[in-house]
Amino acid sequence: MGTAATSRPTTPAFPVWVLWSCLALVSGSAPGQPQGAERWKLLSDDRLHDPASPAIGVLQEPGEALSLMPPDLVGNKVNWVRALREGYIAPRAKVLEDTTVKLLDSKVIMMNTGEMPLVVFPHLTHTEWLDCSNCHEGIFKSEAGATPVNMFQILQGRYCGRCHGAVSFPLTECRRCHSMSRSELKTR
């Protein structure tokens, strides 16, 4: 549970905008799509894109882009943390040249979880993608306990819900966050 901060490289990104625009989930597959592509609906069938739009013929199909990524069982079916760490993607670390990007390797344990296991928030997993200012001081205060996070508000799209359920794994995956038993905390 250290607080080591290290700089990360500023490698140009794999076209992440292509990936984020292809978040529709599965059903059918089409001829010519890569193996595993059937996990994602075609853009013309996803009920998000207009099948009559000329853009349908220009946009990359989700299965074409995402079937090459490390699989996950939920959400958009991609394990994005593995994709980043294993080099499948390399998002831009910063937009502005004078921005200092730091990785923060620390964990916050959230105790106010009712009968659920405690929440372990891994800063490293988040700072590999985001600058601290994406969350602090707007969504979360830096001071421990200063932000009254609760599941009702998260489910309404506040706090963690700003990303989880939208561009990150869905909120139905409770154990990914609620991952520490109270007895485990006592043995640390």
Image (cartoon, helix red, strand yellow):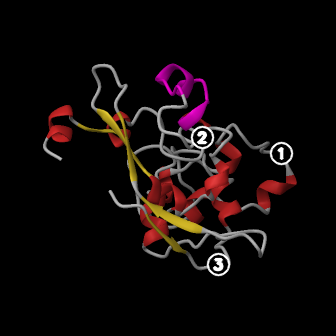
Residue 140 spot, x, y in % from top left: 59, 38
Task: Report if the CB atoms under discs 1 and 3 are less than 8 Å apart.
Answer: no
Q: Nearer the viewer, residue 117 or 68?
A: 117
User: CA separation, marks 3 and 2?
Assistant: 25 Å
Magenta stretch holds residue 86: no
In percent of the image, x 76 and y 74: which residue is there? Answer: 98
Label 2 sits on what residue type? Ala
Q: Which residue is mark 2?
A: 166
Lower sequence index among marks 3 and 2: 3
Q: Which residue is mark 3?
A: 10
Q: Is residue 91 above or below residue 108?
A: below
Label 1 sits on what residue type? Ala
In percent of the image, x 42 and y 64: which residue is there? Answer: 82
Quadrant for the N terminus in the image = bottom left
Q: Judge whether residue 32 can be spotted in this image.
A: no
User: CA separation, marks 1 and 3?
Assistant: 39 Å
Task: Report if the CB atoms under discs 1 and 2 are less than 8 Å apart.
Answer: no
In percent of the image, x 79 and y 63: which residue is there? Answer: 58
Q: Which residues are magenta?
A: 148-160
Which secondary structure lies at badge 3? loop
Magenta stretch holds residue 151: yes
Q: Which residue is mark 1?
A: 52
Task: For label 2, count other residues whose C-alpha is less than 10 Å away and answer few (under 14), some (14-19) or many (20+).
Answer: some
The image quadrant that residue 139 belongs to is: top right
Residue 84 spot, x, y in % from top left: 49, 68
